[in-house]
Image: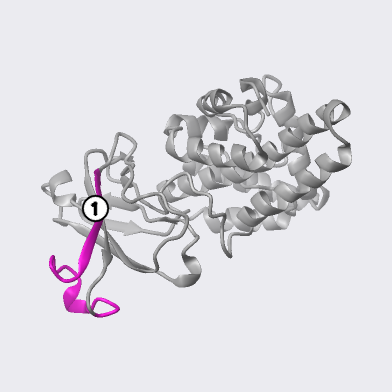
Amino acid sequence: MSFDEKELLACCGSSKFANQMAMASPFSSLQDAVTTARDIWFNKVDVNGWLEAFDAHPQIGKSAPSNHKSETSVQWSKGEQSTALATATSSSLQELFDWNARYREKFGFVFLICASGKSTSEILAELKKRYPNRPVIEFEIAAQEQMKITELRLEKLFATKAESASTYYQHPVTIGKKAEEDRVSIVGAHLTGGGKKSSVRTRPPITTHVLDVSKGCPASGLDVKLEMWMGKQSRPSFDDGNNVGGGWVLEGFSTTDKDGRSGQLMSIVDELKPGIYRVSFNTGKYCPGGFFPCVTLVFEIRETQKLEHFHVPLLLSPFSFTTYRGS
């Protein structure tokens, strides 16, 4: 099924995303489109593209500006916020407006959440929960929420085109059944946030990137390597932690690009081999005057998690670092 840039802008307000998706069109199925969208959004759209997409969303509870570039997006946004507006009181709506203003003042962009089916109280609770986050962490979360919204809208786009085409090509009941199957198998599972994710991958199952929080920008030119524990013991002991010959086997090596992304550190496989992994960063070379000559993050992937994706970023300054598990 083919789509043009204008149609795809309704799904995601990033011009680069819409352009890349239009060039990748036609798609054989909704699954194909979602897989391509994830790859483009997380691997090809830069920081400016993410911000452009965020700005395309109206604040929850408010209408989009009259100069909005996609009328379809405006209508979809109203539908996605319908539960929130239906459950709002004048006081809860005012509290939501106030918190939205505080959020935008702190982070510089609108509070973004996949609002479909969520009440005002649920959205407000999530906003308050995320407000204390560091900007770099919140930026990642907002990007993930944008992807959830994009997937829902791609489903709507497919359904709309399929419905119009059904008059000529096939019975509408078949289209409805296919759309429902796609919705359950792709979008539904993705939004639950738990359990196994789809095994169809567009990137390696372990990824990382580095943000220099002291400069407020990605850390480019930083060497990164991924290793897996393959020692005689099933698990490394404390003394094995940084032993070069202690059973750690190199999976891949790369250098971060201008966006702080490390590139491909391992092969794209459907199932990860369970075990202990570590990602090491040559922080001494990147920041010679810093406190850490290197940073190593060790984590375990269990049998029940082998279909999941593990994003292990590094938030770095000369005298501190932190990490978290992303998606």
**According to the image, label 1 marks what residue?**
225
Any magenta on residue 253?
yes
Residue 285, position as x, y percentages in the image: 13, 46
Q: Is residue 44 left or right of residue 79?
A: left
Q: Is residue 326 left or right of residue 266?
A: right
Q: What span is in magenta?
A: 233-254
Direction front: furthest residue: 169
Q: Which amino acid type is shown beneath numbered disc 1?
A: Lys
Please name the residue shown 87% across and 37% down the image: 172
Q: Is residue 72 above or below residue 192?
A: above
In terms of depth relative to the viewer, which is nearer, 115 or 12? Answer: 12
Instruction: Choose top left, top right, bottom left or bottom right for residue 5.
Output: top right
Q: Is residue 209 above or below residue 36?
A: below
Q: How is the image coloured?
A: one colour
Residue 61, position as x, y percentages in the image: 72, 41
Residue 17, position as x, y percentages in the image: 53, 29
Mark yes or no: residue 184 visible.
yes
Q: Secondary structure at mark 1?
A: strand
Q: How many marks?
A: 1
Instruction: Choose top left, top right, bottom left or bottom right for residue 147.
Output: top right
Mark yes or no: residue 116 visible.
no
Any magenta on residue 262?
no
Q: Quarter holding the N terminus?
A: top right
